[in-house]
Each structure stands twice: as C-alpha cells, then as structure tokens.
Image (cartoon, helix red, strand yellow):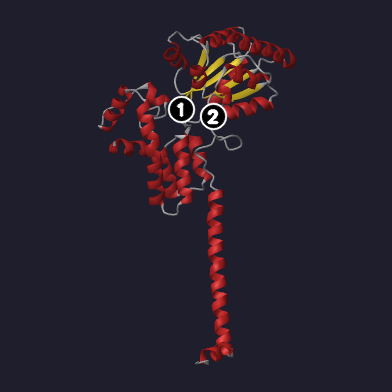
Amino acid sequence: MNMKWLCDLFSDTGFNTLTTWINTLVSLGVLVFIQKLRKTWKRDKNPYTPWTPVTPPNFVGRRKLLKQLEASSERYESISLIGDRRIGKTSVLETWEKKLKEQGKSVFLLNGQRDEGATVSAFVTEITGKLASENPDEAAGALSGWANEVKVRMNFTPIVMVDDAEHIIRNFPSRFFERLRGMMQERRVIWIFSLREHIDLIYKNTHNNTSPFDNLLHIQQVGLLETEAAEEIIKWGGFKGEKAKLMRVWAGRHPFYLQLLGRHLSDERNQRAALDAFQTESARRLAELWDKISPKEQEMLKQYMAGKPADRPGLRTRGLLTEDNKIFGKVLEEWLKDN
C-alpha cells in the first residue's frame, strides 16, 4: 500500500492545507446559514400585509369617513358601510372600534362569516354574553333588554358593528330584522353594517320583500384612499425612485393592490419578477371581481379601453375608477387587455 498520501497529510504542509480546507468549508456553511437567516428575517419584517386588516398605529387615511362615522354616532344614526372586497372596510371598522373603546363607549364588533353569523341565537348570545333563544322575537327581546341596561349603566347607546353583514341578512329570519328596525327607530342600538352591496338589495333578493331598513341607514362608501395615504403606504417599504413609481402607476390609490405590490417588491430583488408575481396574484382577484360587476359596468370598462369615456357611480364606489373616471391603476388596464 502506498502510504505517501498519509505521510503528506500529516506533514506540516499537508496539515496546514487540510486545516485551510476545513476552515473554508466551515466559513462557507456559516455564510450560507447567515444568508438564509437574513432572507427569512427580511420576509418576516416585510411591512406589507395585504390579507390582514390595518389598524392603528399603521392605519392611514380615511379621515373624512371616520369623521362621518363619528358624526353619525353622535346623532344616533345607524350606518351601512358599503365597499368592495379588499377595499379596507374591516380596517375601518377595527380602527373605529379601537377609538370608541378608548372613549369608554360600549362597542361590539362581530363578523357575519364567523359562528355568530350562523343563527340568531349565536348572534345575540355573542353580544349580550347570555344564552339566547332561536325564536326571533325572544332573541330580539333579549337584545333590546340588554341595550337598555347598557344605556342606563354607561349613559351611552351601545354600538354594534357587523362585518360581512350580508351573511346575517341571508341567514336570519325576516322577523328578527323587523325587530332590529324598531331598535333603530327608538335609538336603543346604533348599528353599523359592513357590506359589499346595498343592504336593501340583498334583503329583497333573499326575503322577497322590502327591506325593513329602508330609509333608516345612513350610507357611507369605502373607496380608494386619499393620495397622501397612498404615499404613506409606499413609504412603509422605504421605496424611492423606480419602485415608488411602480407602486403609483400599477396600484394607484387602492389599498389592497398597494399592499400586494409592496409585498412582492419587498420580497424580490428583481423588479420584473416582483411585478410578474403581483400580476399573477392580482389576476385571480380581478377575475373574481369581474364576475361580480354588472354587464353594463363590464361594457363601460371595455369602452374605456377602446378610448371612450367611462362614468358609472358603481365603478367609482368599487374603487375601479377614480373620481375623474380613470382606471385606478395599470394592473387593471393590463388585465382588461388580456381578458
């Protein structure tokens, strides 16, 4: 057996070479580990969360809307908060809830998609903290009694906010809503319903009858953000120059698309890759939205792409058009070209 390689290995020169190799391998391993750690840390520190509500201190904009909510509550008016999916209604509700609680008000925020939106009993139980009947009159009676107790104890009419309220409109019997109408008229409870469409239309399509809330709810629309608020969101990622321009051009003042594009730009070093990922993810959302808008609204957007003017309130309400009837961002323009 040739032992020369073993002798060379344990010679001073061989040993030093081996040590160098080991140190190099260790260094490379540590470097790879650090790089992975930095990437993970960067992902975890991404300031953009397009799928979760934004609440204080990160909540920006909607100053006029919040003032209108405050004014309505001072007048004991119930409210219908209307806006498209992902336009920021939940962020508004949670921000308003926080402010009311800081003022010592009695406020409850429920969600029609959760358990409390399944039955009248679960709904009233969630609010009052006491097991309620499934009978609509008995459940409404328990709710009314609770509201009276709260008003006497706190000297303020309780506020109940229901996010995704279309689900309770479809799930609950009409008699329960007739009783809620009485509470609104007598100002026992201030209701804030958050929906994607007008509550009267949802009620009529579900119960084949005129809505008991007709002319009782003060309507507030949730549309695009103010320009200043959109700029604040761009600043979250520290974007300047080309990246900031991409945010303005592609996402405009739409809170969801600003956050979605911001997240991809923060995760990807390559801007083209970030934009591709953003468009791919946006396409699913826009296709879903396209199916929701009316044929007239679809035709209006097609005409806009053909160079004709677009002017339809529903498209502005959904945040698809700006106040001056321009498409909110290039992401929608590119999607319309491809579909």
The residue at the far left in this view is 306
Question: Helix, strand or loop at disc 2?
Answer: helix
Indicate left or right for 164 with 102 as reference. left
Where is residue 172 shown, x and y percent of the image?
53, 15
> Is residue 230 placed above or below 105 in the rendered structure?
below
Secondary structure at badge 1 equals loop
Identify the mark at residue 314; answer none if there is no mark.
Answer: none
Figure quadrant of residue 99: top right
In the rendering, at what x and y percent does residue 127 appear?
Answer: 64, 20
Residue to which mark 2 is pinned: 90
* Nearer to us: label 1 or label 2: 2
Kind of residue indicated by mark 1: Gly
**Residue 10, above or below 130:** below
Position above or below: 210 against 247: above
Image coords of residue 69 (percent x, y): 57, 21
- Which residue is rendered at x = 56% and y = 58% of the image? 37
Q: Give the residue at the far front of this rendering.
A: 1
